[in-house]
Amino acid sequence: TKAYLQKIEATKELNAYLDVRPEVSLAQAREADKKIAAGEAGPLAGVPIAHKDIFVTKEWASTAASKMLEGYMSPFDATVVEKLKEINMVCLGKTNCDEFAMGSTTANSAFGKTYNPWDKNAVPGGSSGGASSCVAARIAPVATGTDTGGSIRQPSAFCGVTGIKPTYGRPSRWGMIAFASSLDTAGIIAQTAEDCALVLSHIIGFDKRDSTSIELPPEDLTVSLNDGVKGLRIGVPRKWLDKVAPGLKAALNDALCQYQELGAVLVDIDLPTADLGVPVYYIIAPAEASSNLSRFDGVRYGHRAQKYDDLLDMIKRSRDEGFGSEPKRRILIGTYVLSHGYYDAYYIKAQQVRRLIAQEFDNTFKNSCDVIFCPVSTDAAFSFDDKSDPLSLYLSDLFTVPGSLAGLPSMSVPCGISPNNRPYGFQLIGAKCREAQLLGVAHAYQ
Ligand code: GLN
């Protein structure tokens, strides 16, 4: 813990952490030492971890990288945080992200952007860009993230680390500052699939405080790590591979060749409905966001304007001052698609297509393959100035949002490097609750 805290101090210019409190981390480390000495500790006791600033924590400020929650101290820990505390993992602090997890660059943070340790012109990805940057820079061995439409997988790919978004509902959402509740999923970013499996095993599990929590017995997700891929049918949506930059395509094909050499069978698949993912996601996610963010009214949480005329004016000014431009944009889109007259045309239609996307994946896993191999993004990390308009950023989520809409476990695995020295990654998508298998497939490659 001491070594990591020193390194965090020495790499401040990355702006990967938003809140570091060495004395609190060191107290947790001493507690872990005591447990280890008494023989009461599990294998992860004393291992440091960084938490994305979407999880609320009692001992560190919880801001969702928004001015709205600047300095906010939660009276309780998120379930994920609590579970890792119980096994004496040591929290190093809170990591930067896009405001309310809305974005793909971590440049939407109200507290400054995070840099990609590989190249300071490249985005670290987002919204869990602080987490992926920490793991890549070795200033955290493992980090939590959240993924609503790609926020664990895309930053992992952009920073050359491994990240997994488990099945929706397997980890509890209790204490995660809500973005889009039907999609928000906690997960893990680490160096390897093995490290992900070790930590993820401890955060999944039923939680009665989350109404969408899946009731399944605890599962050790490391059990399939050494199963190999002999005879495994890997589905490849070839049309998706045709949409990526040539260098990335070559890296993806290399990875596929390696899987073949390891004994996997490649199967061509087609996912035409999943191609509608972006428009569907950018209706459903803002709709839910506009509803979730209505709680920030200056009365109960966070920022309150100093000057106002009456109650309504206080709410208006507090929201205007507290929210950055991306949450505001999503509130507007969400309110629009939920409004009378547009609800059926947009929101209901999007829900219908979402169901069809989930069915398409179900049928694919039933009839054609065991896991799906596809890109995470169309290229390696882009530069900060490359994609400044919101629409091109939204469109760049084309390969990650389908798995989110279907609630499927999916992960990002590093696979080589671009001509301009930025990491590449591929994505694996599995059937519901098959994360152990997915981690095994990633491990076979690594
Ligand atoms: N890039 C997507 C968005 O902006 C995904 C974000 C996320 O998964 N939290 O909504």
Image (cartoon, helix red, strand yellow):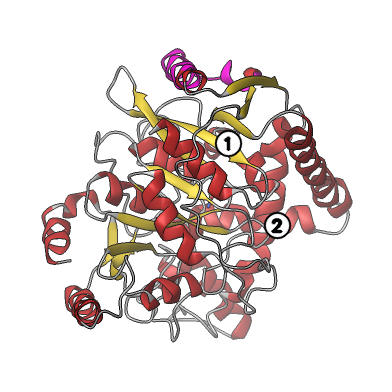
Badge 2 residue CB within 8 Å of ligand 1: no
Q: Which residue is mark 2?
A: 287
**Residue in front for this viewpoint, 202 or 60:** 202
Residue under the image location 40 percent in, 72 percent down: 62
Give the quadrant of the C terminus: top left
- 148 vs 411: above or below: below
**Residue in front for this viewpoint, 193 or 355:** 193
What type is the residue that disc 1 sits on? Leu
Badge 1 residue CB within 8 Å of ligand 1: no
349 on left or right of 251: right
Q: Which residues are magenta?
A: 239-257
Please count the marks in the image.
Answer: 2
SS of the residue under disc 2: helix
Contact between labelled residues 2 and 1, with CB atoms less than 8 Å apart: no
What type is the residue that disc 2 sits on? Ala
294 on left or right of 273: left
Residue under the image location 48 percent in, 48 percent down: 164
Q: Which residue is mark 1?
A: 391
- 63 vs 167: above or below: below
Residue 425: image x %, image y %?
A: 43, 31
Please indicate, yes or no, whether residue 287 appears anywhere in the rendered image. yes
Residues packed near mark 1 inside 10 Å, few (<14), some (14 to 19) or many (20 plus) = few
Residue under the image location 44 percent in, 53 percent down: 197
Is 242 one of the magenta-colored residues? yes
Residue 308: image x %, image y %?
A: 51, 81
**Residue in front for this viewpoint, 364 or 314:** 364
